[in-house]
Image (spheres, rainbow, N blue to C red):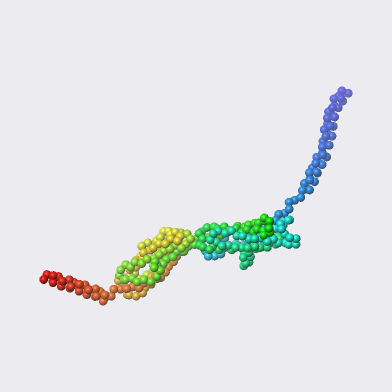
Amino acid sequence: METIKRKLPVFFIILSLTLSIILMVPVALFAQEEETTEEEIVEPEPEPEELIFDTKLPKIQAKEGETFSFNFDVAYKPGDEPFGIEEGKSEKTFDITVDYPTGWIAAVASGSTEAPAINLKFNSTESLRLMAIPLITQQPGEYDFKVTFKSAVEGDTLEGSIEFTAVAPPTYEISLTTKTGRLSTEITSGKDNHYKLILENKSSTSVENISLSSTEPEGWQVSFDQDKIESMEAEEKIEIDVTINPPEKTIAGDYMLTFGASSENSNDSFDLRVTVETPTVWGIVGIGIIVVVIIGVAVIFARLGRR
C-alpha cells in the first residue's frame, strides 16, 4: 500500500502534463489558422502607372558635321488605376523635352516629323529617335542628352526619362598656304629669294610631328627655316620662311613649285607659280655705261679743280 501511495503523485503529475499538451495543441492550431485567414484578407497594392524605356545604343560616335541619331523605344503601362483617363479611352498624352549641351541642338522625332508631344497607347511600344546636331566644332569628349516624357494631364505627376551620350572624336586638319594669299610670285635667278608661308592647325586637338616638303625644277635650291615642327596646338599658326634659289642660267619664264605639310593624321599642299626674271645683257651694259659716265664726269671736275 505504501508503494502505491508513493506512485500516485507521480501518476497525477504525468497526467496533468499530458492533459496540458492536449489542450494547448488545438489552441495553437486555431491561432495559426486565424493568422492565415488574416493574411489572405490583405489585398495587394494596385499596379502603378509607369513608362519603360529601352535602347540598344545609348552611346554613339559620329564624325564632325554628321548628325548623332539615337533610336529608342518607350512603352506606357497604365497599371490598375491610370490617372486622369476618361472611361473608354486607352491612351495618354505626354509632353517631350530634351536637355542638351550648349552649342548643340536636339529634338525627338517620330519618323521624319519632330515630336514635342506624343500619345502613347496602353501597353504598347512606340519607336522614336533623338536627333542631335553640333552647331559649332566641338572639343573631343562626351556630351550628355536627356529625353523626358511628362504626362500632359493636369495634376498628373507621371514622368520618365532616358539618357544618351554623344562621343565627339578628335578632328585633324592642317593647312599650308602663302602669307599673302596669292599663289604666284616673281623671283630672280642666281640669288636667294625669300617667301613666306603660313602653317595652321585647324584640328580640334594638337598635332604632332609635322614635316614640310617641296617639289621644284631640277637644279633649284629650296629650303625652309624650319622643316619639322614637333607639335602645334589647336588653332595655332606658324610663319615659315622659304628660300628659293633658281640657277643663275635659268631661262626667264613661269615655273611651278609644290609645297606640302604632312603629319600622321592630316596633310595639305598647294602649287605656287613662280615667274623667274633674269638680268639682261643690255641691262648690264647700261649699268656699265652709267658707271663710265660717272667716272668721266668725276675726272673732268678733278682737272678743272686743279686749274
Count of numbered circles in the view:
0
At 36% from the left and 74% from the top, the residue drawn is 254
- Judge whether 220 appears above or below 72 on screen: below
Q: Quarter-wise, where is residue 62 in the image?
A: bottom right
Q: Indicate left or right for 278 with 70 as reference.
A: left
Q: Quadrant of the C terminus?
A: bottom left
Q: Could you say where residue 183 lies in the image, as x and y percent from the top left? A: 40, 71
At 65% from the left and 62% from the top, the residue drawn is 117
- Judge whether 137 appears above or below 26 on screen: below
Residue nearest the viewer, comparing 275 with 118? 118
Query: Can residue 21 be seen in the rendering of this structure?
Result: yes
Q: Quarter-wise, where is residue 207 in the image?
A: bottom left
Q: Could you say where residue 288 lies in the image, as x and y percent from the top left? A: 22, 73
Query: Can residue 263 be seen in the rendering of this structure?
Result: no
Q: Could you say where residue 143 lies in the image, as x and y percent from the top left? A: 55, 58
Q: Indicate left or right for 140 with 113 as reference.
A: left
Residue nearest the viewer, comparing 217 with 282? 282
Q: Indicate left or right for 187 with 46 as reference.
A: left
